[in-house]
Image: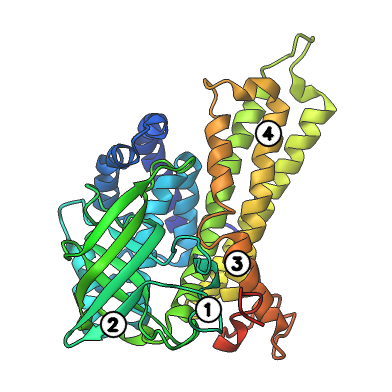
Amino acid sequence: MAFDFTLTADQQKLQNTAREFAQEVLAPITRTVDEEPDPLRAFQLMKPAYAEAVERGIAYSMLPEEYGGGGLSNVDFLVAAEEIQAVDPGFGTTVLVNGLGLMPVWYYGTEDQKQRFISRATADTSGEFIVGYAASEPPGSPGGTANFDAPAAGGAGMAVTAVRDGDDYVINGRKYWPCNVAGWDGQGADLNLVVVRTDSAADGTSGLSAIIVERGTPGVTYNLISTVGQRSAQNSEIIFDNARVPAANLIEGTAGNGDLLINRNFAWSGPVAGIGAVGIARAAYEAALDFAKTYTAGGASPIINFQYPGYVLGDVAAKIEAARAFCYKTAHYIDTHDYHGEMIGAMSKVFSTELMFDCVYKCMQVVGVNSLDRKHDFGRLLREAAVFPLYDAGNFGMQRRRVHGVMADPSFDPRTVMDHKFQPFTKEMEGIGTAQGR
């Protein structure tokens, strides 16, 4: 059989395990965390759940077994991620960012770096070890992360610099929006993968690299950001003031290739964000369907028996299935192409997150004004759904531009994804539509 969408016995077990964790550990605290006004306190309320995720092998499930990770395929990871994010997508983001911080070490690091960073994280027994990923920077003029790969030097792209000084790099500048980076106490995650400009004379396609900044590094401070959604995750500003980091912490294969790291990272996370949006839409759909089967609006029978609610919810159900299938296809593509999927990863993220946002609002229209009552969860679900198109390389900041860059290249075959062929992503495909690009 060429296609089989039936979950294997192991995948069903994984799904049930993740669903149990979400319902038993996350669901009881989700509303409390969402309503906590202090972003650091909100994140700290998730600490026991995170420790449980470490204990159950969830926190580092995406990393290879040879370095202590769970060894899940991307498809398997999505099966679990949907269940977790259907209840609390912010917690799903926290786990996802462990991967964004450490997967590049696996891709590009030396064996020593893999042991020092990946194995150190997976071997920790405290239940608190957490990893951040810092690419995003403050908006500015010029500036802003969306133009990180701009061909022109000195006027666009990343401004955080790392200058070699003997056996160290000296880092200066600001990052804004990175997740997990401030750690549980606002003083820093255990490890942060930071994308920096190591060559100020070069453009964004050759002047960027990635370096690990360890907790306790002098000259690094953090300010938490209070967000409207995913309150259980943590976003922060990082300020580097002559922070000295060992040169051995520069991930070897990223030297001058930080641009490719960013694109590869967000290709991997694309279907995870997509399946998170599926999870939130699923939660809204199930709640709206249950409401429609019991609410009569003063009539003789529940509103599910009338065309508008029935047709709308039927459309929503179909869109959820379509988005889930696209995310699975994308994860399978990445699994079978050496963790590359720069084009399809962006496509699935854009398609799924925007379609699912509309689905959540359609569910609210079925419920009507009652969806605004805080005793229901639709308000939180709408805020959570709004996050997905905007974060993880915004759909109009990086994702669509990556698809555009591939399509515009003379070598592009429009049937590549359809035929499951490998689509290389090269530096020549970058920079299209950037502030100072072509």
Q: Is residue 256 left or right of residue 370?
A: left
Residue at left offset 36%, top offset 64%: 174
Which circle marks residue 163 in the picture? 2
Name the mark nearer the viewer: 4 or 1: 1
Of label 1 and label 2, which has the lower sequence position?
1
Q: Is residue 438 above or below residue 374?
A: below
Q: Amino acid under label 2?
A: Val
Element at badge 2?
strand
Residue 68 visible to an observer of this rendering:
no
Q: Is residue 30 left or right of residue 189?
A: right
Q: Amino acid under label 4?
A: Cys
Structural crowding at the residue carrying mark 3, measured as other residues with C-alpha within 10 Å and reported as few (<14), some (14–19) or many (≥20): many
Which residue bears the numbered disc 4? 363
Of label 4 and label 3, which has the lower sequence position?
4
Name the mark nearer the viewer: 2 or 3: 2
Residue at left offset 57%, top offset 57%: 6
- Quadrant of residue 48 within the rendered picture: top left
Task: Report, in whole angstroms, how far the alpha carbon at label 1 lies from the one at label 2.
Answer: 19 Å
- Quadrant of residue 36 within the rendered picture: top left
Give yes or no for contact between labels 2 and 3 (Cβ–Cβ under 8 Å): no
Which circle marks residue 149 in the picture? 1
Task: Report, in whole angstroms, how far the alpha carbon at label 4 lies from the one at label 3.
Answer: 27 Å
Structural crowding at the residue carrying mark 1, measured as other residues with C-alpha within 10 Å and reported as few (<14), some (14–19) or many (≥20): many
Residue 353 at what x, y percent from top left? Answer: 61, 53
Residue 169 at what x, y percent from top left? Answer: 24, 80
